[in-house]
Image (cartoon, rainbow, N blue to C red):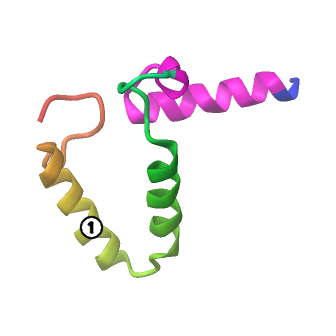
Amino acid sequence: MAVDDRASARLAEIAALLGCPVEKFFAHDDDAFDIGMTYELLSLWSTIRQPQVRQRILEAVRSETGRNGAPPGTAA
């Protein structure tokens, strides 16, 4: 499998996990992800080692989005 094929497949996996189309990563308008903020959020998340802290943060984000524990791609 070529590098481009692997990268495309990985991006498709990430998009599926996020519940969005791959095209969302390439949008040039207000509908695009803020890559800088997304990177910062993932970088900070990876530094948190305590499971209870991660759980507390995840619950706060779910509350802010109205998801309240529902998996991505489903209604809350």
* Amino acid identity at mark 1: Ile
Give the answer, above or below, for where 37 lies relative to 72.
below
For this rendering, which residue is in front, 31 or 42?
31
Which quadrant would the N terminus be assigned to in this image? Answer: top right
Q: Splitting the image into 4 quarters, where does residue 18 fall?
A: top left
Magenta part of the chain? 4-26
Q: Relative to 3, is 37 above or below?
A: below
In the image, taking residue 53 as reference, residue 22 lies left or right, namely: right
Q: Position of residue 48 (x, y in %)?
A: 45, 76
Q: Return the x and y of residue 76 as percentages of the image width and height.
A: 11, 36
Residue visible at 81% across and 24% down? 4
Residue at screen point 46% across, 23% down:
24
Residue 45, given in percent of the width and then of the height, sits at 45, 66
Left or right, residue 13 beside residue 10: left
- Toward which corner of the image does residue 31 lie, by quadrant? top left
In the foreground, 41 or 53: 41
What percent of the width, then of the height, locates residue 21?
Answer: 45, 19
Lateral position of residue 32 relative to residue 76, left or right: right
- Residue 26 or residue 18, whichever sits in front: 26
Residue drawn where x is 13% and y is 53% of the image: 63
Secondary structure category for the residue under label 1? helix
Magenta span contains residue 11? yes
Taking the magenta stretch, the answer to whether it contains residue 13 is yes
Magenta: main secondary structure equals: helix
Q: Is residue 34 above or below residue 22?
A: below
Please name the residue that numbered disc 1 is placed on.
Answer: 57
Q: Residue at x 36, y 27 (%)?
A: 30
Q: Residue furthest bottom?
A: 50
